[in-house]
Amino acid sequence: MRIAPPPRNEVNFAMVDSPSLQFLPRQQEAQIWKLDEDPIVIPGDHLNTYLGPVDAPQFARYETLDLTIGKYSTPGSNGFATVEIFRFPDFVKAFGAYSKQKNGNLRFLDIPNESFAKAHSVHVWRGPFYVRITGAGPADTVLRLATFVADKMPPAPSKPAVFAFLPDKQRVPGSERYSADAAFGQPFLANSFQATFNVDNDLIDGIVIPAANKQAAGNILDQYKALYLHNGKLLDPIPNLGEDNFTAEDRYLGRVVAFRIDRFVVAFNGYHDRQHLLDLAASADQRILGTIRKQLVTADKQAENADNGNTSTVPAWLQNKH
């Protein structure tokens, strides 16, 4: 005789708690918006039940702790909105999940830390949270709802610090992204901080990958070099760029200038003028060197090194850079 399986342990999402619940407006807090039903909180290990098999793994890569959902309406004006608050362990992962939505036709807003609107949605990165609001309402009511939610959240001090290694000049405003899974379509370039540059109408993408150590960074650069070795053509390396570098071109992969300095891998990819890539790479190299020099000086001061002429703690490749 066939025995029926025991019932599955269903989770009552309306009973799950989260710090994000405090950010959802109740009663008449958000003016015309009315909360239709009790909010729900979906734990990070149950995201598939709400987001589905395609989106859930993407959010899992950024270690989403939970997702809080509130559904709203505007009585008498047919407005509706769903507020989704994704909570993360830190603001870098929250920025990453938010930045993955930076595609298509979008308009940047003035809600900090950063925000933008699409046709029927508003997206906000605020500290360790990513807020996504979908819906429609009279005038700018959806935008005001987003502002109300974000204003109650703690902001991040700034964008992730790694972006400081990429040049400021010619960087497309708001183009910064953090990808936990890939860059330039290559999984081995995961955990990369990315930005787009416009050099005389030549659009170029740049990335910085902070690897675990120098050896890991070297392995990443070797894999990237091997990709062009098998599919395209390697060009002469650039003197005095990082500790190791390569330049290459391919019909489909485009042109690239990539280098490693300390534990960081930096690459610029485009399809037009190679000199534009070289100029951006040289600028990034100097920005990283400047940061490393400051760190070494700070370390020396902390150690109270009495020998001012001792450069033994400074790598040879750093001593020779100007």
Image (cartoon, helix red, strand yellow):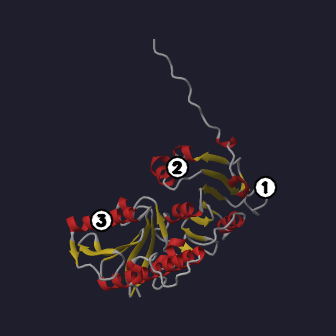
Q: CA distance from mark 2 to mark 1?
A: 27 Å
- Residue nearest the viewer, comparing 104 with 94: 94
The residue to which callout 3 is attached is: 222
Circle 3: element type: helix
Which of the 4 image quadrants contains residue 13?
top right
Q: Earlier in the sequence, mark 2 or mark 3?
A: 2
Q: Does 262 sit above or below residue 13?
A: below
Q: Does 119 sit above or below residue 275?
A: above
Which of the 4 image quadrants contains residue 266?
bottom left
Q: How far from the left and from the top, in percent, is residue 232?
A: 21, 70
**Identity, as a three-letter code, of the amino acid under mark 1:** Gln
Q: CA distance from mark 2 to mark 3?
A: 37 Å
**Identity, as a three-letter code, of the amino acid under mark 2:** Leu
Q: Residues within 10 Å of mark 1 (few under 14, many from 20)?
A: few
Q: How far from the left and from the top, in percent, is residue 313?
A: 46, 75
The residue to which callout 2 is attached is: 51
Q: How far from the left and from the top, in percent, is residue 302?
A: 60, 74
Q: Quadrant of the N terminus?
A: top left
Circle 2: element type: helix
Q: Quadrant of the C terminus?
A: bottom left
Q: Which label number is shown at residue 268?
A: none
Q: Which residue ends up furthest to the front in the rendered image?
A: 307
Q: Which residue ends up furthest to the right in the rendered image?
A: 28
Name the residue at 59% across, 51% down.
Answer: 65
The residue to which callout 1 is attached is: 27
Residue 74 in view here: no
Q: Nearer the viewer, mark 2 or mark 3?
A: 3
- 19 relative position to 210: left or right: right
